[in-house]
């Protein structure tokens, strides 16, 4: 259980933050943290960011976050979260717990159900690939990729970095299922898409779609930032756990 408070547009960002890659179903963070787009930039009153975001941001390291969670198991804590998509900061209150996995018969090691990595939030949306035209009968069409409305944010192995990363990934999965995590600007949600790159579908390219990268192909900022993050498919990327 938890809640979010009012948001603000930051004037500065820390050089590093904890990037939220995965949120486990039914965990304390489920529905409150948005995978791929959310970054933890503060924990509790000692390191939280005021809503005017003028103060210096005290970003926890993974070890510091783990310590705070251990010391506050069963006690509500406040996380300060930057969302790269909306470019806003919000406070999220939730309760660390090991007992969130119903029916497992044992407590989970993770107190929040998060997988995180330390990285620069300023470059958050640089490594995304915009789906452009989609050819009829192509692997991209069969997978349900939407022309001009979808962006590839990562895959089952985690985020991708660098312009050639997506193309290299596709080439390494010829005739193999490739699980991608795709953001829809029309629906403002993240979903899992399984595509099988191949040369046998009868057209050009392994996917049969155009792909744009760079400043002209970034994810657009939503006109109205969402008040909560529900219904997002959760990618697997076990870089770190909280």
Image (cartoon, rainbow, N blue to C red):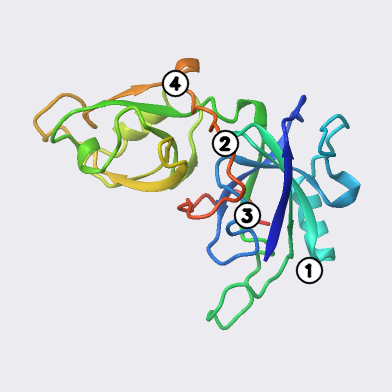
Mark whose residue sits in front, 1 or 3: 3
- Nearer-the-camera pick, 116 or 212: 212
Tell me residue 72's x, y (percent). 82, 65
The residue wearing badge 1 is: 73
The residue wearing badge 2 is: 224
Tell which circle, 3 or 4, labels the residue nearer the N-terminal end. Answer: 3
The residue wearing badge 4 is: 217
Tell me residue 98's x, y (percent). 68, 72
Q: How far is disc 1 from disc 2 in space, using C-alphas?
A: 34 Å
Tell which circle, 3 or 2, labels the residue nearer the N-terminal end. Answer: 3
Q: How far is disc 1 from disc 3 in space, using C-alphas?
A: 18 Å
Instruction: Identify the residue at horizontal 43%, vertical 35% (top origin).
Output: 185
Q: How far is disc 3 from disc 2 in space, using C-alphas?
A: 17 Å
Q: Secondary structure at mark 4?
A: helix
The residue wearing badge 3 is: 32
Q: Is 232 left, or right, of 18 in this rendering?
A: left
- Nearer-the-camera pick, 240 or 153: 153
- Relative height, residue 40 to residue 138 (above, below): below
Kindly check if marks 1 and 4 are in contact, taking CB atoms under 8 A apart as contact: no
Q: Secondary structure at mark 3?
A: loop
Mark whose residue sits in front, 3 or 2: 2
Mark whose residue sits in front, 1 or 4: 4
Q: Is 57 left, or right, of 162 in this rendering?
A: right
Kindly check if marks 3 and 4 are in contact, taking CB atoms under 8 A apart as contact: no
Tell which circle, 1 or 2, labels the residue nearer the N-terminal end. Answer: 1
Mark whose residue sits in front, 2 or 4: 2
Q: How far is disc 2 from disc 4 in space, using C-alphas?
A: 20 Å
Tell me residue 133's x, y (percent). 26, 24
Specify few, some or many for label 1: CA neighbours under 10 Å numbering under 14, 14-19, or 20 or more.
Answer: some
- Relative height, residue 180 to residue 68 (above, below): above
Tell which circle, 1 or 4, labels the residue nearer the N-terminal end. Answer: 1
Q: How far is disc 3 from disc 4 in space, using C-alphas?
A: 27 Å
């Amino acid at each position: 259980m938890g809640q979010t408070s009012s948001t603000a547009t930051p004037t500065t960002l820390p050089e590093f933050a904890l990037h939220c890659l995965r949120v486990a179903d039914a965990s304390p963070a489920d529905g409150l943290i948005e995978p791929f787009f959310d970054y933890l930039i503060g924990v509790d009153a000692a390191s939280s960011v005021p809503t005017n975001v003028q103060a210096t941001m005290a970003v926890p390291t993974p070890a510091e976050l783990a310590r705070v969670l251990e010391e506050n198991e069963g006690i509500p804590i406040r996380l300060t979260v930057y969302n790269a998509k909306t470019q806003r900061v919000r406070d999220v209150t939730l309760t660390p717990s090991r007992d969130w996995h119903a029916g497992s018969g044992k407590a989970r090691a993770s107190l929040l159900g998060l997988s995180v990595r330390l990285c620069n939030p300023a470059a958050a949306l640089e490594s995304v690939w915009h789906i452009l035209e989609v050819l009829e009968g192509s692997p991209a069409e069969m997978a349900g990729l939407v022309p001009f409305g979808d962006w590839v944010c990562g895959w089952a192995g985690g985020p991708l970095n660098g312009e050639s990363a997506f193309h290299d990934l596709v080439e390494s999965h010829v005739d193999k299922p490739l699980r991608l995590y795709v953001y829809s600007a029309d629906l403002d949600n993240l979903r899992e898409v399984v595509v099988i790159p191949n040369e046998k579908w009868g057209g050009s390219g392994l996917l049969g779609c155009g792909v744009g990268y760079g400043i002209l192909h970034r994810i657009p900022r939503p006109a109205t930032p969402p008040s909560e993050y529900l219904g997002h498919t959760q990618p697997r990327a076990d870089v770190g756990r909280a």
